[in-house]
Image (cartoon, rainbow, N blue to C red):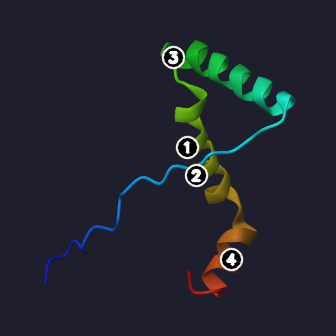
C-alpha cells in the first residue's frame, strides 16, 4: 500500500451568491488592501474561497461539531 492515499475529488463546484451592498464594498476594499499588501491584483471571486476556507479553519466550535458528526 502506498503511503499516499488516493487523492480526493478536486472537481471545483461553482456557487453563486448574492450579497448586500455593504458586504460588496467591504470585499472590494479587501481586494484593494490585498493588492497593496502583495503587489498583485486579485479578483474578489478569487479571494472568497480562500477567505471562507480560513474562516472555517479558524472556527473551533465548527471543527468540534464536524468531528462529532463524523465528517
In the rendering, which numbered label is found on residue 53?
Answer: 2
Marks 3 and 1, how far apart at CA? 15 Å
In the shown orientation, is residue 9 left or right of residue 44?
left
Q: Quadrant of the C terminus?
A: bottom right
Q: With respect to residue 55, does 37 lie above or below?
A: above
Disc 4 target residue:
64
Disc 3 target residue:
41
Mark 4 or mark 3, whichever is nearer to me:
3
Q: With respect to residue 29, does 60 lie above or below?
A: below
Q: Are marks 1 and 2 in contact (CB under 8 Å)?
A: yes
Marks 1 and 4, how far apart at CA? 21 Å
Marks 2 and 3, how far apart at CA? 20 Å
Numbered disc 1: secondary structure: helix
Residue occupying the point 84% across, 35% down: 20
Residue occupying the point 57% across, 16% down: 35
Q: Nearer the viewer, residue 2 or 51?
A: 51
Marks 1 and 2, how far apart at CA? 5 Å
Marks 4 and 3, how far apart at CA? 35 Å
Numbered disc 3: secondary structure: loop
Mark 1 or mark 4, whichever is nearer to me:
1
Disc 1 target residue:
50
Amino acid at each position: 500500500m502506498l503511503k499516499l492515499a488516493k487523492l480526493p475529488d478536486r472537481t471545483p463546484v461553482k456557487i453563486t451568491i448574492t450579497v448586500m451592498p455593504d458586504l460588496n464594498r467591504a470585499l472590494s476594499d479587501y481586494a484593494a488592501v490585498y493588492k497593496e499588501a502583495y503587489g498583485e491584483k486579485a479578483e474578489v471571486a478569487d479571494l472568497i474561497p480562500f477567505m471562507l476556507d480560513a474562516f472555517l479553519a479558524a472556527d473551533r466550535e465548527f471543527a468540534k461539531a464536524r468531528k462529532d458528526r463524523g465528517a
